[in-house]
Image (cartoon, coloured by chain):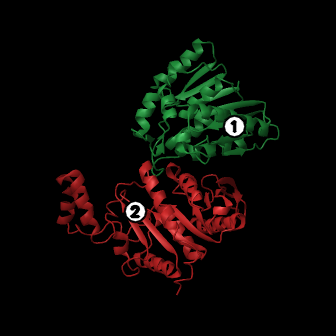
Amino acid sequence: MTELTNFFGPGKHLVGTLSVPAPETQRPVGFILLNAGVISRIGPHRINVKLASALAARGFASLRFDLSAQGDSLQPRAAIPFLEQAVADVRAAMDHMQRTVGVDHFIIAGLCSGAHHATSTAVADERVVGVWMYDTFHYPTAKTPVYYYTERLRREGLRAMVPWFSKLLRGRALRPVAATPESQEYWQATPPRAQYGAMLQRLVRRGTKIFVVHSGSFLDAYSYAGQFLDGFRDYLRPGDIRSDFFPEFDHTLTSVEAQQRVIRDICGWAEDVGPAQAGATRG
Amino acid sequence: MFGVYHPADSKSPTHSVLLCHPFGQEGIRVHRLYRVFAERLARAGVPTLRFDYYATGDSAGDDREGNLHGWVDDIMTASAELKRRSRAPLMTWMGARLGGTLVALAASRTPPDRIVMWEPVLHGPAYLDATVTHRGEAPEAIGFALGKELIEELERVRVSELPVVRTRSVVAAAAADTDAAALVSNWRAAGADSALVVFDYRFNWTADEAMNTPIVPPPALALMLPLLEQLPA
């Protein structure tokens, strides 16, 4: 693996580290690894550095980079709204990889806010053939509070039920939390379910592979395996996307075991993501 | 090894600053703060280099390959690079937490003109107790795998074991930090020019997310920037 850090982008204001596998092993799909919140491009606990190394060993080139003004990147010359700038930055990262490494198709991997930027970019740019998201927006279902309190009961005993009884008295016991469009995931408002579902459906129909992973850090809003698909039953069919749930993992993948599991799963999943999918199911 | 050089606005700077990172989660936490230090110092005419030791940050290497003696070598390499680029005659090495400890270890070998240590790690076993989240065959510290060699080196870190640094040194630490006071006292007793700056602001070094905790706290800027902008005495 060769690694090179430099400036790129239209204003040469973005900083990224390119990890390139041995030329004879390089695959036609590259990875873009994004910031998680305000953490620099190395990611929480250096996860992006570790992932880049594992990907290169399997023939995937990657670019981990800092969005405008984050990490080591500078401010762009002309200001546009942050979320639009993020998409422009990711597209510039893909341009950079296309030019320097020669890959034309991309998988974007993002944790937390990075997951949101990944899908926004995928919608805007057909070069994106895969999206991996960790702890993206939460869309609770009617089952979410049931699993949540069951899990708390298991962990904490009967005292976990005090808030539930209180809600029961107020007739709100089974109302999902954080399901409103007004709720915030980091600095981005959660899109309405219909809007997000239609967006996922559009990506799936285009042939973009989607892999969603949720941790156990927000059990009140995401509490059981299959919740993601349950939440988008009107938009996705079983098998359209892969959705995993690890209640024992936290939001920033603090345990090394969690990091290794996630890296292994991404590498395995990516084997099946490629330009061949793009267009094959388009329609 | 990855580093970012911030050239000074001034054409012939008199001194430069080398910023040395803490380890692990503490290193992640100070990334933004160090960038702000570097940008403001550069604007004030002080060229600055911040860098990642081998096996940390954006530098090459597996987590488990990092160790104190290797990181001391990295400080030497970074210092030489800063000297070559800035051509400034004087240099300060600044390090927070384990970065401060490493700065002291490196300065005992080849001292710069001044070192500044912010809450240096001066008792390795206590540091390990506070940060090691998983022990056994594959130990880890808040999401970073630890090599056996690093653990052994950290277990030996004690105020009494740290070699005397003969160059000017400034240690910024809380009034209650008896190890920091002992270090300055030891070094002074050995004839070194060492000063303790009481800094009671409690920076949350290991918060696992930046949300709800300041990542660039104004008190840290107010303390460090004037200190680092000064010419090493």
Q: Amino acid at mark 1?
A: Ala
- In the rendered image, which quarter is residue A19 located in? bottom right
Res A252 seen here = no
Quarter of the image that includes the N terminus of chain B: top right
Mark 2 lies on residue: A214
Report the residue at 55% width, 21% height from top: B162
Observer-nearest of B153 and B222: B153
* Callout 2 secondary element: strand
Observer-nearest of A116 and A178: A116
- In the rendered image, which quarter is residue A56 located in? bottom right
> Marks 1 and 2: same chain?
no
Marker disc for residue B78 = 1
| In the image, residue A234 above or below residue A189 | below
Q: CA distance from mark 1 to mark 2?
A: 40 Å
- In the rendered image, which quarter is residue A52 located in? bottom right
Figure colour of chain A:
red
Query: Residue A44, image x and y in percent?
Result: 50, 51
Question: For the image shown, how many numbered marks are present on the structure?
Answer: 2
Q: Residues within 10 Å of mark 1 (few under 14, many from 20)?
A: many
Q: Amino acid at mark 2?
A: His
Observer-nearest of B221 and B155: B155
Report the residue at 72% width, 60% height from top: A12
Marker disc for residue B69 = none
Query: Residue A138, image x and y in percent?
Result: 39, 67
